Amino acid sequence: MFYRENGQFKTSYSADQQIFPITQDRLGVLILIALAFVAVPFWADEYVFRAILIPFLILSLAALGVNVLVGYCGQISLGSGAFMAVGAYAAYNWFVRVEGMPLIACLLLGGGFATLVGIFFGIPSLRVKGLYLAVATLAAQFFCDWAFLRVKWFTNDSASGTVSVSDLQVLGLPIQTPLQKYLFCLSFLVVFGVLTKNLVRSAIGREWMAIRDMDVAASVIGIRPMYAKLSAFAVSSFIVGVAGGLWGFVHLGSWEPAAFSVDRSFQLLFMVILGGMGSVMGSFFGAGFIVVLPIAINQVLPWAGDLVGIAVSTAALTHAEQMIFGALIVWFLIVEPHGLAKLWSVGKQKLRLWPFPH
Amino acid sequence: MKLRSLAMTVALATGAVWTSAAVAQAKEQFFPVLPYRTGAYAPNGVPWANGYADYLKLINARDGGINGVKITFEECDTAYATDRGVECYERLKGKAQGSVFQPLSTGITFALTEKAPGDKNPLITGGYGRSESSDGGIFKWNFPLMGTYWSGADIIMQHLTKKENGNLKGKKIALVYHDSPYGKEPIPLLQERSKMQGFDLTLLPVTAPGVEQKATWLQIRQNRPDYVLLWGWGVMNSAALKEAVATGYPREKMYGVWWSAAEPDVKDVGEAAKGYSGLVATGEGGKVIDDIKKLVHDKKLGTGPLEEVGSTLYNRGLVSAAMAVEGVRRAQDRFGKGKVMNGDQIRWGLENLALDDKALTKLGLSTVMKPISTSCVDHEGSRTARIHTWDGKKWVYSSDWIEADSSIIKPLVKQYAEKYATEKKITRRTAEDCQS
C-alpha cells in the first residue's frame, strides 16, 4: 500500500533513468540522508560518534569498495586491508611531505595510489579465478605489511613505525570534534554511495556482473575480461583506499601497519558476504553487523546479567561476545545465504503486496 | 491498566537507580581499567589486571578509599587490539568527569596519545608507551612512569658493559623484537649506544603474535651474536626461549625487557630456560602483599588465584594502580581532600608525585617499588631497574638497582619530542602552564 510503484508513469528518458526510479525509494533515501545529517547530531553523544558511528561509516565505505570487486565483479579479494593501508600511508605522505596540501586532496590521492596498487595486484585475476585468486591477492596483504613495516621512507622515518596526523581541516573548517569528523565521513560516504549506485547500473557495472555470472559467456558477447576485471579492481581499490585514509586520519589519528592487517581484509570480506554480495545496501548492513553488533553484545550482556543477578566477569564477557557473535553469523548465513540485503528486498516485496498478499 | 502500571514501575525504578547513581557518584573516584583477559596476550595481561584490581580493592578495604573517597572501577577488555582499545576508552571515559587511563599496550597508547589531550585525561604508561613522552614539556598528558623502553634498553646495556669489563667493542648484539611499535621502541637508543660503544647491532623482527620464529633463530644460529636482547610479549617470549633451546643458543646470553621476564614466560619452558635473565622494575613481598592477602583474598574478594599474588606481572599491575591512586591523592592535597578529582587535577597530581622511601613505607609499598619523583618536565619519575635470572624454578635477582644513563637518554628524548612537536605544531609548555 505504501510501497507501490503503480501510477508512477515515466514520461521522459531522464525520469526513466533516475538512480532511484521509485518515488518511495527516492524519498526514503533522501529522508535517511537528512536524518543522518540533521537528526543524528542532536541525538548522538560523543561515545556514539567516536566509538560506533565513525568506524561504522568508514568501514561501510570500505565494504562498499570491496562489494564492487567481490559482489559485482565476482573476484574474491583478500587484499582489501592492504589497499586500505596504501590509501592511508599514501595520503599520509602527501600530507606531511607537501606543505599546505588540502586534506581532501590527500585522501583522494591516497585513493589514487591504492588504485595503482590494486590494478597491479589485480593482474593475476586475468589468469586465476575463485579461491586461487583470493590466495593471489593475499600476496598484496603480505607485501604491504612488509613494506610499511620495513621501508622507513613510507612512515617518515618514525622510530616505532607509527605515524600520526593532526590539525585536520577542510577549507579552513577544522575537523576536530566528533561531530565534525562524523559529518566529514558521512559526506564521503554519501558521495561515494551515490556514485557507486550509479556506476553499477551503467554499462561498466553490467560488464562486471556479466563477468561475475559467467566469464566465458561474457567474453563471447564482446565484453573484454581484462578491461572489466581491472576496472573493477581499480574502482574497488580507489574506494577502499579512501576509506583507509579516513580510518587513519579521522578515526585513529595515529596508526601502525597492524591497523590494516589481514584481519581487516577478512573482516571486510565477511561484511560483504553477510551484508549481501552485489548490493550497495548490503555493504551498510554488513558493516553494521560486524562493527556494531559485538559492541552491542558486550554492553548488553552485563546489563542482562545484572537483571538475573549474575555478575559477568570481563573475560567471560569477551568470550560470550565472541561466541554469540559467531553463532549469529552462522545463523544468518543459514537462514539467509544471500545476506542481510536479501532480507531487505524480501521485506520490500512484501510491502508491495501488503495488505493483500496473494 | 496492567501495562501502564508495569511501565510506571519500570520508570520509577529507572529513576531511582538514576538518582542513586548520581548521588553515589559524588563521592566516588572512578578508575577505568583497560586490561586484556582474552586473546593472544592474555597469559601476561591477566596477572597485570589482577594486580591492578586487587590494589584498588585494597585501598577501599584498608583505607576506606583515598581520604574517604571510595574507589570504583570498571574493566573493558581490549584483547590488545587498538580499535577495541579506542572503543573501550570512549566507553569508560563517559562514566566519570575524567580519570586516568592505563592501556597496557604501546599500540593503544599511541592512539590514545592523540585523544587524551582533547579529553583532558592523563595516560599512565608505566614501563611502556612512547619513550619520548617522558618529556612532559611536550607530552602534557603522558606519564611513562618508572621507566621507558629507552631506559630499559640502557639498563641492560649498562649491565652487559659491566659484564664485559667496560668494553663492548666489536661485540655482536641481536635484538629479537615483536614487530610492532612496542618492539621497535628501543631501537633508537640501541643504535645510539652502538655508535658510542662500537658494538654491532642486528635487528631481528618477529611477526606478531610471535609463535613462528624459526627463521629468526636460524639467523641467530648463523650469526652467533654475543648477546640476544628479547623484546617480546605474551606467547612470543616462551616461543623464543623454546627456539633458543632448539638452536642451542645459551640462555645465559639472553636478556629480556621487563615484559619478557616474568613467570608466564618461563613457566612452560621450566628447567630449560635456566640462566635466562631479564629486567625487573618492581620488587617483591612486603607489607602491601601481606595486606592484599589478608584484606582482599582472605575475604574472598580477590580478583585472581591466590598463588599469583606477588608474582612479577601482578606486582607490575599493583604498582601501576598505586601510581594512579597516588596521583589522585597528590591532587587532593592541592585541590581539596576528600573530593573527587577530574582528569586535569589528576594530571597535576601525577606531575608532582614525590614518593620517597618514607612515604612508600607508610603506604606499604617500599618493598615493591623504588622512590619516584616527577615534575612538569620529567614525566618518567624514576628510571631504575634490576636484572633477575631464572634458576629453573623461580626468579632470583642477579644485579643491584641500575639507573639508566640520562646523559644518553635526555638528548634523544629531546630530539624525538621536538620532532613530534613540530609535526603536531605543539609549543613547549610555559612555566605558568606547569603550575596549572
Image (cartoon, grey):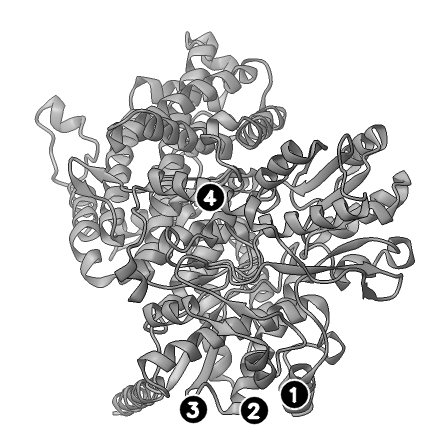
Q: CA distance from mark 3 to mark 1?
A: 19 Å
The residue at the point 42 percent across, 46 percent down is A286
**Residue A31 point in image, percent of width and height:** 17, 49
| Dot 4 and dot 1 within a common chain | no
- SS at circle 2: helix
Look at the numbered discs 4 and 1 and tell me whether their residues touch, using CB distance below 8 Å.
Answer: no
Q: Is residue B342 left or right of residue B56?
A: left
Look at the numbered discs 3 and 1 and tell me whether their residues touch, using CB distance below 8 Å.
Answer: no
Look at the numbered discs 2 and 4 and tell me whether their residues touch, using CB distance below 8 Å.
Answer: no
How many C-alpha atoms fall within 10 Å of the one at disc 4: few (<14), some, or many (≥20)?
A: many
Q: Is residue A160 above or below residue B293?
A: above
How many C-alpha atoms fall within 10 Å of the one at disc 3: few (<14), some, or many (≥20)?
A: some
How many C-alpha atoms fall within 10 Å of the one at disc 1: few (<14), some, or many (≥20)?
A: some
Q: Nearer the viewer, residue B27 or A30?
A: B27
The residue at the point 66 percent across, 46 percent down is B209
Amino acid type indicated by mark 2: Arg
Residue under pointer 2: B62
Residue under pointer 1: B291
Q: CA distance from mark 2 to mark 4?
A: 50 Å
Which quadrant of the view contains residue B302? bottom right
Disc 2 is attached to a residue of which chain?
Answer: B
| Dot 2 and dot 4 within a common chain | no
Amino acid type indicated by mark 1: Asp
Residue under pointer 4: A271
Residue under pointer 3: B68
